[in-house]
Image: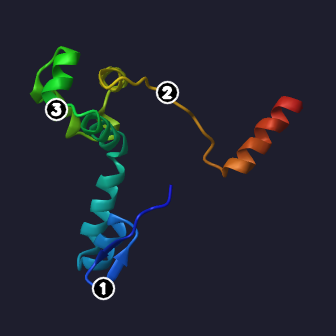
Amino acid sequence: MAKKATTIGKTTYTSVPQMVHETSDDESFADAFEKRLHSRRIIKELMILRVSHDLSQTDIAERLGCTQSRISKLESTTDNDIRLGDLAKYADAVGLRVKIILESKESHAAARGKELGFRVG
């Protein structure tokens, strides 16, 4: 899926981090903002799933047997702080299951080539 560009004034940005870096006078703020944004990718997906299923935090809390404030706290945390069990329960509450895929940090083609070599060798 192609990224949408956002235009503010006469300038077009392809991402929020790009916009913050190009409009902020404080480079350390822009770096911290980008780091925080990247530290919440899973949490952001959970929130998008909740909203796309027209569910409130209270709805999720009822399905998980906890309080709304617990869901609020979970949605305010970072990906590093979410427990795998909480992630699985939250996903289940919106009708999904968690599937974890471990990939090589190398390029996908190179990694596949190595994997193939291991299978053949």
Q: Dot 3, how many residues are within 10 Å of its Cα: few (below 14), some (14-19), or many (20+)?
A: some
Check disc 1 and give the amino acid type.
Lys
Q: Nearer the viewer, mark 3 or mark 2?
A: 3
Check disc 3 and give the amino acid type.
Ser
- What residue sits 31% from the left and 54% below the top? 37
- What residue sits 45% from the left and 62% below the top? 3
- What residue sits 17% from the left and 22% below the top? 61
What secondary structure is marked by label 2? loop
Residues at circles 3 and 1 in contact by the CB criterion of under 8 Å: no
Q: Spatial distance from mark 3 to mark 2, Cα to Cα?
A: 24 Å
Residue under numbered circle 1 = 10
- What residue sits 22% from the left and 17% below the top? 64
- Residue 79 image position (x, y, % from top left): 33, 39
Considering only order in the chain, which callout, 1 or 2, is on the residue closer to the N terminus? 1
Residue under numbered circle 2 = 99
Q: Nearer the viewer, mark 2 or mark 1?
A: 1
- Residue 6 image position (x, y, % from top left): 33, 70
The image quarter in which residue 10 lies: bottom left
Check disc 2 and give the amino acid type.
Lys
* 95 with respect to 8 (left or right): right
Residue under numbered circle 3 = 56
- Residue 76 image position (x, y, % from top left): 19, 40
Residues at circles 3 and 2 in contact by the CB criterion of under 8 Å: no
